[in-house]
Image: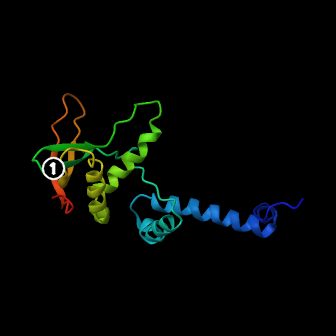
């Protein structure tokens, strides 16, 4: 029985060379994106950043020292119905330890949906949130996307969240 093409490729000298070069390029690109501000970073950083995006191995380490994020972020979809009533849709909270990975995708999505760089997903998101309320007694007429944030206190009580509505969509299909 003949080995699959992928296995034959990986066993060949050329295949091993190509895989090794690819691994080295990915590792060097990752190192290049995380260099401290310096002349070395200015010369390799832009190329390294582009490489990790093209290779889809981009990583963010903002939760680690020396400068972890000090701001808590939240997102709400505020739904207004034709009868004037309202509802608030929020991202589900996951368990602290067990099965938390399942909710990680929501936290990553939160970073995107709040960002001005991803404004092209704001309207589809608002319409999706509206669709979650299709079975309510009154049709949805508007959805507001709201950013909530606060600078975390190191000790004592946490300050209240600040918020602002950054996108609104009027739902056309309501009577």
In the displayed structure image, the side of residue 7 where residue 35 appears, left or right: left
Q: Quadrant of the N terminus?
A: bottom right
The quadrant holding residue 85 is top left
Q: In this view, does 94 lie above or below 89?
A: above
Residue 136 percent location from the top left of the image: 23, 44
In the displayed structure image, the side of residue 105 where residue 2 appears, left or right: right
What's the residue at 77%, 70% (across, down)? 14
**Which residue matches tag 1?**
80
Q: Quadrant of the C terminus?
A: bottom left
Residue 110 percent location from the top left of the image: 33, 50
What's the residue at 69%, 63% (across, down)? 20
Residue 43 percent location from the top left of the image: 45, 71
In the displayed structure image, the side of residue 12 where residue 39 appears, left or right: left
SS of the residue at dot 1?
Answer: strand
What's the residue at 50%, 68% (across, down)? 54
Tell how many labels. Answer: 1
Residue furthest to the left = 84
Residue 125 percent location from the top left of the image: 30, 57
User: 53 or 26: which is nearer to us?
Assistant: 53
Q: Is residue 100 above or below residue 167?
A: above
What's the residue at 47%, 30% (across, down)? 98
The quadrant holding residue 22 is bottom right
């Amino acid at each position: 029985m003949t080995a699959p093409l992928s296995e034959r490729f990986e066993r060949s000298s050329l295949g091993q060379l190509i895989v090794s070069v690819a691994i080295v390029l990915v590792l060097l690109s990752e190192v290049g994106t995380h260099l401290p501000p310096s002349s070395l970073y200015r010369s390799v950083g832009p190329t390294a950043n582009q490489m990790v995006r093209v290779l889809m191995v981009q990583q963010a380490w903002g939760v680690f020292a020396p400068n972890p994020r000090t701001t808590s972020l939240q997102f709400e979809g505020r739904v207004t119905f034709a009868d004037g009533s309202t509802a608030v849709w929020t991202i589900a909270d996951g368990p602290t330890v067990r099965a938390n990975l399942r909710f990680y995708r929501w936290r990553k999505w939160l970073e995107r949906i709040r960002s001005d760089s991803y404004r092209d997903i704001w309207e589809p998101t608002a319409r999706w949130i509206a669709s979650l309320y299709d079975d309510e007694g009154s049709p949805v007429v508007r959805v507001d996307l709201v950013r909530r944030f606060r600078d975390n206190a190191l000790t004592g009580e946490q300050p209240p969240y600040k918020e602002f509505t950054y996108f609104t969509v009027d739902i056309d299909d309501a009577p």
